[in-house]
């Protein structure tokens, strides 16, 4: 018995990108920083919340690249002239990626109380029924 890959199953025509999408998502394995939540805020909307304490809005960049929402953070080191006895709050950079479906758009982003909220909206396309005319052979 031959094992079929998900993207090559005969009933899934045109879904060959599905395996690449799954592989890309797996490779985006983030290290857990910063922590985040994903919540469904309505039937067609979602919110991603990242804990970015210590980051200012100018330290953060949000882009959509090849159907991936990419959030980057880079703090500027302001420790010049300061003497730390213990430094447990690191000014570390991060990149967090989320793969978006084709019908999901990024809405607004709000930075409040050390949390970055990014709203997403899913657009449901109208159902389309197409009738295909059957032509008689030889015509």
Image (cartoon, rainbow, N blue to C red):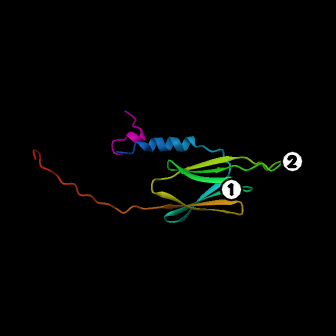
Q: Which residue appears at 39% of the width and 61% of the height?
A: 125
Circles 1 and 2, Cβ within 8 Å, touching? The answer is no
> At 66% across and 54% down in the image, what residue appears?
60
| Left or right, 136 with reference to 78 | left
Which label's residue is closer to the chain start, 1 or 2? 1
Q: Name the residue beneath numbered marker 1.
A: 58
Q: Which label sits on residue 82? A: none
- Taking 5 as reference, is 82 left or right? right
**Closer to us: 132 or 57:** 57
Q: Quadrant of residue 12?
A: top left
- In this view, 55 is above or below 27: below
Compare residues 84 and 19 and report the one nearer the observer: 84
Outermost residue on the top side: it is 1
* Dominant secondary structure, magenta: loop
Is 3 a magenta residue?
yes
Task: For residue 88, say whether it is visible.
Answer: yes
Residue farthest along the left direction in this orientation: 138
Element on which disc 2 rests: loop
State left or right for residue 13 relative to residue 48.
Answer: left
Mark 2 sits on what residue?
Answer: 86
Which stretch appears magenta? 2-12
Residue 73: percent from left, percent from top:
67, 50
Label 2: few (<14), some (14–19) or many (≥20) C-alpha neighbours in 10 Å: few
């Amino acid at each position: 018995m031959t094992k079929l890959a998900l993207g090559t199953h005969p009933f899934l025509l045109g879904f060959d990108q599905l395996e690449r999408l799954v592989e890309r998502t797996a490779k985006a394995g983030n290290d857990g920083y910063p922590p985040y939540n994903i919540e469904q805020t309505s039937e067609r909307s979602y919110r991603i919340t990242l804990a970015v304490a210590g980051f200012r809005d100018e330290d953060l960049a949000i882009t959509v690249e090849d159907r991936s929402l990419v959030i980057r953070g880079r703090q500027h080191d302001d420790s010049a002239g300061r003497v730390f006895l213990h430094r447990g709050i690191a000014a570390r950079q991060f990149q967090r990626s989320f793969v978006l479906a084709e019908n999901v758009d990024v809405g607004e982003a709000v930075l409040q109380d050390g949390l970055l909220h990014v709203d997403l909206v899913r657009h449901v396309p109208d159902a389309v029924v197409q009738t295909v005319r059957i032509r008689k052979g030889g015509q």
